Amino acid sequence: MIELKNISVSFGKHQVLRNINMVFETGEVVGLVAPNGTGKSTLLNVMMNYLKPKQGEVIIEERKKYKSPKENSKIYQVISMMPDQNDLYDHLSGYEHLKLYQSMWKTKHLKIDELVKRLEMSHYVKKKVGSYSLGMKQRLCFAMQIMSDTKIMLMDEVMNGLDPNNVELISNVIIEKKEEGKTIIIASHLLENLEKYSDRIFFISGGNLELFLDKSQGYADDSTYIKLSHVNFETIQELFPSLYQVELNHHEMIIRVQDDEHLSETLATLISHEYNQFSVGHLSLPDAYQLKF
Ligand SMILES: Nc1ncnc2c1ncn2[C@@H]1O[C@H](COP(=O)(O)OP(=O)(O)OP(=O)(O)O)[C@@H](O)[C@H]1O
């Protein structure tokens, strides 16, 4: 469990985080979503104490705070940030990196060979990192964090450079770790993927965390949307002048309806005008992102 209390961060006059209050609970996966340069890494860096906020504090496991080197080193037994590819040593093998993490975090109970097999790294893990592709390094970085076995795991762009099979592989391990009770906070631009395993998803916007989805409660925006394909935006605007509608791209648009009565009326009108290619429901994360940013 990690709590953020009144966290504000500014770089000069640019305020990146504004008075953030949030608790990330034990055993949940939280997704952080925002365009480049909005504050995802800043927030994760504050949680790791790599960056001191202008105001506010981070509380880990209800009472631990970043106060002194001694206290901080205890906290780093509980929380970790996924290493960056730039943190890897070209002259060491992946296996040696994993050994190093295992000894640093004293996690002899975890079997390196099992993890290597699980992440399909067996064919390359004994080779030097200097010879790895982007995706091979990324899997190693993820494996290193799994090896640390901390209760809280922060991951910045965990799926960077991974092909669809590896995205699936890592997603499954994230779900397993969540089931073991880990708190996992992930900043990602892979929206459909993030939506699959996150318990809660927040947009970072205007320096604040805005809830998009809490799987135990539902969508923050509980309106119903009709998503239409292969339509002419102007024609639809003329048909429904009073309804909120947005063009997503050249051939897709959405209409928001307030209640079931409006929904039935709107669908009836669409069908009577021979518009049959639509779906009805909540906004998907990619569509909500497109509307928001
Ligand atoms: N050390 C710094 N000094 C000055 N400005 C900074 C510093 N670190 C971050 N910023 C600024 O803070 C803002 C947020 O940066 P941050 O790295 O948190 O974005 P991000 O959402 O993680 O982006 P990305 O998706 O590209 O990783 C950006 O405008 C960035 O330029």
Image (cartoon, grey):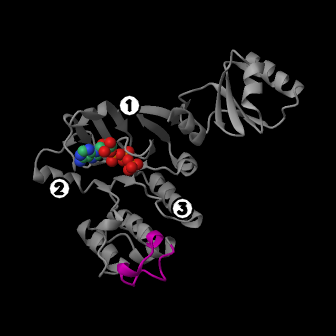
Which amino acid, mark 1?
A: Gly
Q: Quadrant of residue 227?
A: top right
Residue corresponding to mark 1: 206
Do the numbered discs 3 and 1 sit on residues whose CB atoms are within 8 Å?
A: no
Q: Quick check: 169 left or right of 50?
A: right
Q: Which residue is mark 2?
A: 73
Q: Is residue 87 left or right of residue 67?
A: right
Three-letter amino acid code of the residue under disc 3: Val
The quadrant of the picture occupied by the N terminus is top left
Observer-nearest residue: 67 or 204?
204
Is 249 magenta? The answer is no
First-in-chain label (3 vs 1): 3
**Please, what is the dominant secondary structure of the magenta stretch?**
loop
Reading the chain from its start, which is encountered first: label 3 or label 2?
A: 2
Let me know if residue 259 appears in the view: yes
Q: Which residue is mark 3?
A: 167
**Where does residue 208 sit, x and y in percent of width and height?**
37, 31
Residue 127, percent across and down?
A: 39, 84
Q: Is residue 240 left or right of residue 291?
A: right
Q: Which residues are magenta?
A: 120-136
For label 3, the crowd category at 10 Å Cα-Cα, with few meaning under 14, some 14 to 19 and many 20 or more, is some
| Type of the residue with mark 2 | Ser
- Within 10 Å of disc 2 (Cα), the crowding (few <14, some 14-19, many 20+) is few
